[in-house]
Image (spheres, rainbow, N blue to C red):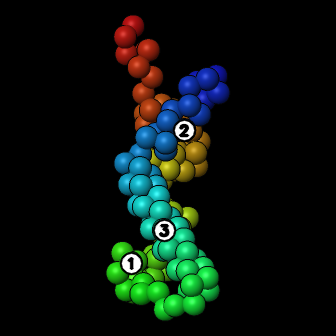
Amino acid sequence: MLWLKERGIACVAESVLNSEELDKTVARLVVAARHDGYAQGYAECSHHVVNALKVNWDTSKSATHGVDTGAAFAAMKTEFDNLQLPVMDLVNVALQSEDHVAQLKEIFPDEDEDLV
């Protein structure tokens, strides 16, 4: 049980934080948020120009014209919320085992023990 307290929790956290699936999903989420923020900012700025100058402002040249950035951002948030990490499936199976510490040690071998 000492292994689980000292090393096991850190191994699980490290595996989750370093997972390729998480990295890629977070990167896509950041890009979607940036695009949506740009689109909303451009729309707000255009609205102020129209009101201040009393002219029709052509927004068709905007990089986000005709793109539903809000829906793309919402879809990415949903993808992030539903993200499944293979390592967590392994951990869940191990925790249901009678000897969950041994199972976890198989998934996350202790590098220090290999050196002895």
Q: CA distance from mark 3 to mark 2?
A: 33 Å
61 or 55, nearer to the observer: 55
Q: Is residue 69 visible?
A: yes
List the residue tagged with mark 3: 38
The residue to which callout 2 is attached is 13
Residue 49 versus residue 108: which sits nearer the camera?
A: 49
From this viewpoint, is residue 29 visible?
no
Would residue 93 appear left or right of 31 to someone viewing this image? right
Percent x, y of residue 78: 53, 71
Residues marked 2 and 1 touching at CB (< 8 Å): no
Rendered residue at 37%/86% (across/down): 60
For mark 3, does the 10 Å Cα neighbourhood hold few (<14), some (14 to 19), or many (20 or more) residues? Answer: some
Q: Are the residues at dot 3 and dot 1 in contact (C-beta closer than 8 Å)?
A: no
Q: Position of residue 116 (x, y in %)?
A: 39, 7
Q: Which mark is residue 7?
A: none
Q: Amino acid at mark 3?
A: Tyr
Disc nearer the start of the sequence (2/1): 2
Observer-nearest of 65 and 114: 65
